[in-house]
């Protein structure tokens, strides 16, 4: 039995809850013009995502490590009546950025439509409470608004994740919403008009272009911002270390006292296999079938930290991350095993200071 004093802690709080203090501090310090129904100004939203220090000394942690202009274009797009499409390869923080944009702009990141092959049109438009529908017929009381309809009526930001995974006819139900800013309800002879402040942030990844590619009519309704992969190894190490620290705190895992060196090795492996060449450019490599994204990197290191905490001495070592690295690289057993073994024997084995990593990976792949 759970009491109010022992209420369970959410495994992953929403952005507006996890960073509530930073959002409050930014609101208090923000004296710039705010678009209608925005929680803060576009400048403050950018500061929230990119990080900085406020005049009162409050430190705003960066939520996105990447080109500043990417964030500024995304935020300025939402300040217009044009929807925003975040595009990029898997693992470039599209979902993470969309969540924090909605949290900073509207104070609510939960108005979410998750795109899948089975997403129905009702998820974007509206559905019905069939018990009331059968009892009293179509009425506003029987109507079940979608997250998009709620955002329209309240002037908030809605999120549509994995847009290209949704069936084409469901995608196209957004066209009228984005162009006319209305959502017809023909069963009631009514329509819902968007309140100022309403907008949509959608995400899609480059690898899904062949799933359900966006029609030109729908694509024209979005301003597309491409989120790139981290430009440098140091930037990727920073991203991974920061996210692993956040996840570790929520999972009650110990901090990473000496883990950055191990993270740097895993980042090097991922970047080299992803690029098809070693860091110095001297050796060409075959790339595996997987994406080897930053998100997978974070998962590998978090899993390694859990191993170190529960079955080791709390220090992240090669033995803790080896199995995760092999699992991320070798997705197609037939093809990827050859790629991995070649990389292991020609690069890792010969690299100074990597003997422990080589042995651990050999054992993990055995």
Image: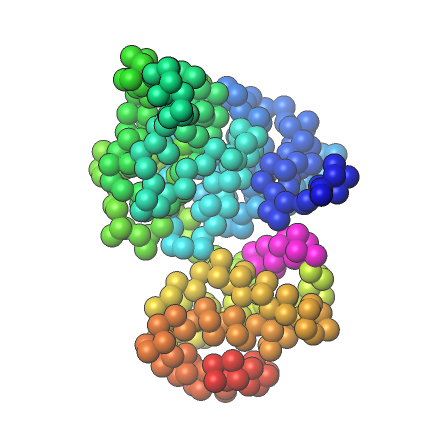
Query: Is residue 344 covered in magenta?
Result: no
Which region is colored magenta? 239-252
- Determine whether 186 is above or below 307 in the image: above
- Determine whether 352 is above or below 156 in the image: below
Q: Is residue 192 visible?
A: no
Q: Which residue is drawn at 71% across and 43% down?
A: 1
Residue 265 occupies quadrant: bottom right
Query: Is residue 244 covered in magenta?
Result: yes
Q: Nearer the viewer, residue 251 or 87?
A: 251
Q: Can residue 223 be seen in this view?
A: yes
Left or right of residue 45, residue 88 in this image:
left
* Magenta stretch secondary structure, dominant: helix
Q: Residue at x 77, y 39 (%)?
A: 5
Q: Which residue lies furthest to the right in this view?
A: 5
- Determine whether 142 is above or below 321 in the image: above
Where residue 171 appears, x then y in whole percent?
29, 37
Q: Which residue lies furthest to the top in this view?
A: 189
**In the rendered view, how is the structure colored?**
rainbow
Residue 123 occupies quadrant: top left
Where residue 302 appears, x then y in whole percent?
59, 62
Left or right of residue 323, residue 83 in this image:
left
Residue 357 occupies quadrant: bottom right
Q: Which of 161 and 32 is in front in this view?
A: 161
Where residue 311 appears, x then y in whole percent?
68, 73
Q: Which residue is drawn at 64% across and 65% down?
A: 306
Q: Which residue is drawn at 45% across and 55% down?
A: 91
- Determine whether 226 is above or below 127 in the image: below
Where residue 104 appears, x then y in whole percent?
56, 33
Q: Which residue lies furthest to the front in this view?
A: 135
Q: Nearer the viewer, residue 85 or 249?
A: 249
**Total marks drawn?**
0
């Amino acid at each position: 039995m759970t009491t109010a004093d022992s209420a369970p802690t959410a495994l992953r709080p929403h952005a507006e809850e996890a960073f509530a203090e930073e959002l409050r501090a930014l609101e208090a310090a923000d004296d710039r013009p705010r678009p209608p129904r925005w929680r803060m100004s576009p400048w403050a939203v950018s500061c929230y995502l990119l990080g900085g220090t406020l005049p009162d000394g409050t430190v705003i942690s960066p939520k996105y490590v990447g080109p500043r202009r990417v964030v500024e274009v995304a935020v300025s797009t939402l300040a217009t009546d044009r929807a925003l499409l975040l595009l990029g390869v898997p693992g470039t923080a599209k979902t993470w950025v969309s969540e924090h944009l909605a949290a900073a702009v509207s104070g609510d990141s939960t108005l979410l439509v998750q795109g899948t092959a089975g997403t129905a049109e009702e998820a974007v438009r509206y559905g019905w409470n069939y018990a009331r529908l059968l009892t009293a017929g179509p009425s506003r009381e029987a109507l079940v608004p979608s997250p998009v309809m709620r955002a329209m009526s309240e002037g908030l930001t809605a999120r549509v994740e994995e847009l290209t995974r949704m069936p084409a006819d469901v995608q196209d139900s957004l066209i009228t919403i984005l162009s006319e800013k209305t959502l017809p309800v023909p069963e009631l002879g009514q329509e819902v008009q968007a309140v100022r402040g309403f907008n949509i942030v959608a995400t899609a990844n480059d690898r899904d272009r062949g799933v359900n590619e966006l029609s030109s009519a729908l694509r024209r309704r979005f301003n597309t911002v491409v989120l790139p992969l981290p430009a440098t190894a140091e930037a990727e190490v920073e991203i991974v270390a920061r996210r692993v620290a956040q996840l570790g705190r929520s999972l009650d895992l110990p901090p990473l006292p000496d883990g950055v060196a191990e993270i740097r090795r895993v980042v090097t492996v991922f970047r080299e296999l992803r690029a098809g060449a070693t860091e110095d450019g001297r050796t060409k490599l075959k790339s595996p079938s997987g994406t080897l994204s930053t998100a997978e990197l974070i998962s590998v290191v978090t899993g390694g930290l859990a191993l170190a905490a529960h079955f080791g001495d709390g220090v992240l070592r090669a033995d803790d991350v080896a199995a995760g690295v092999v699992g991320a690289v070798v997705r197609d057993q037939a093809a990827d095993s050859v790629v991995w073994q070649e990389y292991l024997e020609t690069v890792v084995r010969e690299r100074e200071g990597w003997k422990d990593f080589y042995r651990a990976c050999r054992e993990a792949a055995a």
